[in-house]
Image (cartoon, rainbow, N blue to C red):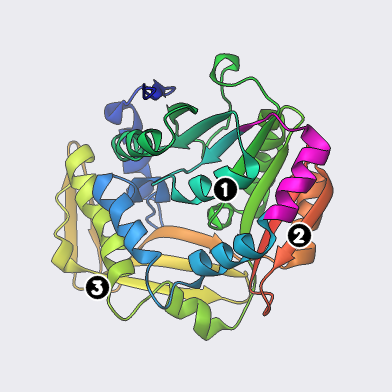
Amino acid sequence: MVRTPRFIQLQPVDDAGQMPALWGGLQAPVARVSPKYFYDALGSRLFEAITELDEYYPTRTEAAIFDAHAADMAARLRAHAGPAHDLIDLGAGSCAKAAKLFPLFAPRRYVAVDISVDFLKHSLECLQRAHPDMDMVGVGLDFSAALALPAAVYDGPALVFYPGSSIGNFAPDEALRLLREARTVARGGALLIGVDLVKDKAVLDAAYDDALGVTAAFNLNVLRHLNRIAGTDFRIADWRHVAFFDPARSRIEMHLEARQSLTVHWSGGERRFAAGERILTEHSWKWTRERFDALLREAGFRDVSGWTDAHDGFGVFLACA
């Protein structure tokens, strides 16, 4: 008999409660929208499409690193945490990356954490059919502010899995906070994390501004999402996607730029935008291998191991809690 995945919504969906912060961001001197608003159901699917693009190297490069070194990673995890562990997948999305590790890592329980609950439910239900005997738990959680899981969700020790270089969405001080929380969640286990490394600007620019315009659609979809949950009246045709790497700050910046002067309204407020004025939607910091190793150790991890591709463009780190 196939198990049924359990689902837990740790933070009840309360769009109204999020509106003051969202509107405040739109009214800030430099308007901004949190990247968490990318991930409604359509945004999650658009991101899956981005990972298939020729320009978007992180997914295939990370996958190649796992193909070459996952057995070594699994052996090091067993040496530290023993053969029995849970796998906690942060930003699980389609769950496909974690599922590829099941044969080698053999987790006793899979805990998938994501902000996009509907997308996660569908993904986890499909995965459960492929692995009918595994205990699976879906957790609806926005861990951008804080990462904490109740004791009843898993037993520990756990492998906290955070692939795809999503740690880059956090400024260095915020990344340190999240890594410290991940170490607590691991309960004596380990962290397995993918990190995008500094490389040629042209390669980075293309990865976030592809020729097909899929990343542009992903970015613009945030306006559609805001119209639905926040009552704004953005016209998507009035905006263009802008993305570039800033070498001085070692980060990608992604913006939406007004094509003309316009005013956006919502209940009780409005914001005028001049032609060319931008809304910041994402930063993605890029690391060197040495700097990220140091960050992990500052967060309290030890016995840090790292693997990169042949060009040192992407890194996967296993850090013991």
User: Tag 2's secondary structure?
Assistant: strand
Identify the residue shown where x is 60% and y is 44%. Answer: 161
> Does 262 sit above or below residue 310?
above
Q: Is residue 202 magenta?
A: no
**In the rendered structure, which disc, 3 or 1, sits on the residue that comes first in sequence?**
1
Which residue in the structure is indicated by mark 3? 275
Image: magenta residue range: 71-86
Q: Quadrant of residue 147?
A: top right
For this orientation, the residue located farthest to the top is 152
Q: Is residue 73 magenta?
A: yes
**In the rendered structure, which disc, 3 or 2, sits on the residue that comes first in sequence?**
3
Which residue in the structure is indicated by mark 2? 306
Identify the residue shown where x is 49% and y is 51%. Answer: 97
How far from the left and from the top, in percent, is residue 223? Answer: 24, 54
User: Disc 1, disc 2: CB below 8 Å?
Assistant: no
Identify the residue shown where x is 67% and y is 80%. Answer: 311
The label on residue 101 is 1
